[in-house]
Image (spheres, rainbow, N blue to C red):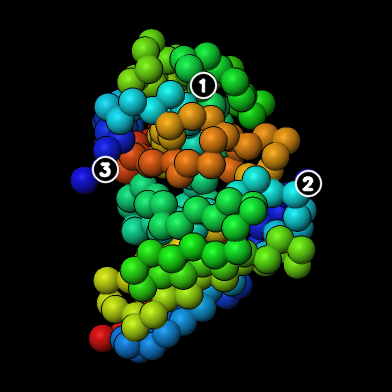
Amino acid sequence: KQEVTQIPAALSVPEGENLVLNCSFTDSAIYNLQWFRQDPGKGLTSLLLIQSSQREQTSGRLNASLDKSSGRSTLYIAASQPGDSATYLCAVSAYSSASKIIFGSGTRLSIRP
Amino acid sequence: DTEVTQTPKHLVMGMTNKKSLKCEQHMGHRAMYWYKQKAKKPPELMFVYSYEKLSINESVPSRFSPECPNSSLLNLHLHALQPEDSALYLCASSQGAGDNQPQHFGDGTRLSIL
């Protein structure tokens, strides 16, 4: 059974810092990995999707990497801003059930002005 | 504003009531999903519809009944719910089920069972 873990559960950093969020998964036979952002009381916003054949994806100040063999992904946020404060969720889907997403518990990020 | 619209935003109901949650998208997506999210927990998949047919039911109790009347609309009918069913119910859509495209989420319906 696939398990997705995110460490740390919470992170607080001053504005302007570069930071890395971590995600690990137990079964390397994934179809894709996604990073989402969730603001309090809101739905999820997809940030980046990495297909199993890819190693990384970039969007603006965000860069996500994927190492399937080690069961790890990282989300790098450059030059953090207070508006980046949110919960970041990592999610994987498997080839056997590609439409089913399994989420990690998330990292609650707070950027201090 | 999200491209997936969920109504109502909040719902309070008694355990004997019948109510429905509604989800609508006009992006031409052919896969739609229902998730349940408890406070400070990640979303958990409940149902997946692909081309208006139910493709995944994650062993959800029968007091939750999904319906997909057309490719743009997804309903979740509720009946005889329990207090532990109080949660945020999220709807999502994607171009196709399992096609390496991201899911787009609505802002959810916050459900409270008295």
Query: Mark on residue B50?
Result: 1
- Viewer-proximal residue among B11 and B90: B90
The answer for how far apart the CA atoms under marks 3 and 1 are is: 21 Å
The answer for how far apart the CA atoms under marks 3 and 2 are is: 32 Å
Q: Residues within 10 Å of mark 1 (few under 14, many from 20)?
A: many
**Is any atom of residue B48 visible in this view?**
yes
Q: Chain of mark 3?
A: B
Answer with left or right where residue A31 lies relative to residue B38: right
Q: Are marks 1 and 2 on the same chain?
A: no
Answer with left or right where residue A44 lies relative to residue B47: left
Q: On the image, numbered disc 3 is attached to which residue?
A: B2
Q: Earlier in the sequence, mark 3 or mark 1?
A: 3
Residue at image coords 51%, 22%: B49
Instruction: Classify mark 3: helix, strand or loop.
Output: loop
Residue A51 location in percent, x, y? 58, 51
Residue A22 location in percent, x, y? 59, 71
Query: Mark on residue A1?
Result: 2
Query: Mark on residue A41?
Result: none
Q: Quadrant of residue A79?
A: bottom left
